[in-house]
């Protein structure tokens, strides 16, 4: 190899006239067609990251077993009202909710225990609270 092949260029390569930071001004019509650099996303906006803990998109996806058990109890009891509105009204009027809904309560309790586990089901008040608040309309019937 010769010294002429190892020599570095004497000056940096020239930039085109339309490149940002060029020493010579470019034609106005050529810079107008050059797209501007995209702005950085605003914090919290699309692509931006919020500070603090992230929350699940769907609250039913929560992994806390107690929250899951409470929601499930309330959902199962609410379903009883949806499917048997007349029976509920009769039971509230005659104070016979526990007797009228005995089969539905047993069936839903089995589903509840199957999904949350017997220990959690028996150690928390969620099932009874849901029966009283939702099925009994806030009265202490269970």
Image (tube, rainbow, N blue to C red):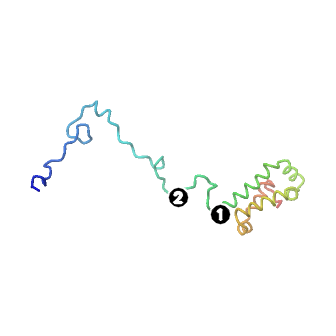
| Residue positioned most to the top | 29
**Quadrant location of the N terminus?**
bottom left
Q: Is residue 36 above or below residue 110?
A: above
Report if the CB atoms under discs 2 and 1 are less than 8 Å apart.
no
Residue of label 1? 65
In which quarter of the view is residue 97 placed? bottom right
Q: Residue most toward the left?
A: 3
Residue 32 in percent (x, y) is at 31, 32
Residue shown at 88% from the left, 50% from the top: 90
Instruction: Tell me which residue sits at (70%, 62%) in the image.
Output: 115
Q: Position of residue 72 (x, y in %)?
A: 71, 58
In the image, farthest residue toward the right: 94
Q: Earlier in the sequence, mark 2 or mark 1?
A: 2
Q: Secondary structure at mark 2?
A: loop
35 versus 5 height, above or below: above
Q: Quadrant of the C terminus?
A: bottom right
- Helix or strand or loop: what does disc 1 sit on? helix
Q: Residue at x 87, y 53 (%)?
A: 91
| Residue 105 horizontal/vertical position (percent) | 81, 59
- Left or right of 64 in this view: 46: left
User: Residue 3's mark?
Assistant: none
Q: Which of 139 and 34 lies nearest the eye of the viewer?
A: 34
Q: Which residue is mark 2?
A: 53
Dividing the picture into quarters, in which one does residue 55 lie? Answer: bottom right
Q: Residues within 10 Å of mark 2 (few under 14, many from 20)?
A: few
For discs 2 and 1, the disc positioned in front in the rendered view: 1
- Foreground pick, 16 / 91: 16
How many numbered discs, if any? 2
How far apart marks 2 and 1 lie (CA) works out to 19 Å
């Amino acid at each position: 190899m010769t010294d002429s092949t190892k020599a570095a260029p004497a000056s940096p390569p020239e930039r085109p006239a339309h490149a940002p930071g060029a020493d010579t001004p470019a034609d106005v019509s050529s810079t107008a067609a050059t797209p501007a650099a995209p702005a950085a996303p605003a914090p919290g906006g699309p692509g931006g990251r919020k500070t603090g803990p992230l929350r699940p998109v769907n609250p039913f996806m929560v992994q806390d077993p107690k929250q899951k058990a409470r929601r499930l109890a309330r959902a199962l009891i609410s379903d009883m009202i949806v499917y048997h509105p007349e029976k509920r009204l009769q039971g509230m009027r005659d104070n016979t909710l526990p007797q009228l809904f005995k089969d539905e309560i047993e069936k839903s309790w089995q589903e509840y225990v199957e999904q949350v586990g017997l220990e959690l089901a028996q150690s928390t008040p969620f099932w009874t609270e849901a029966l009283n608040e939702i099925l009994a309309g806030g009265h202490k019937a269970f």
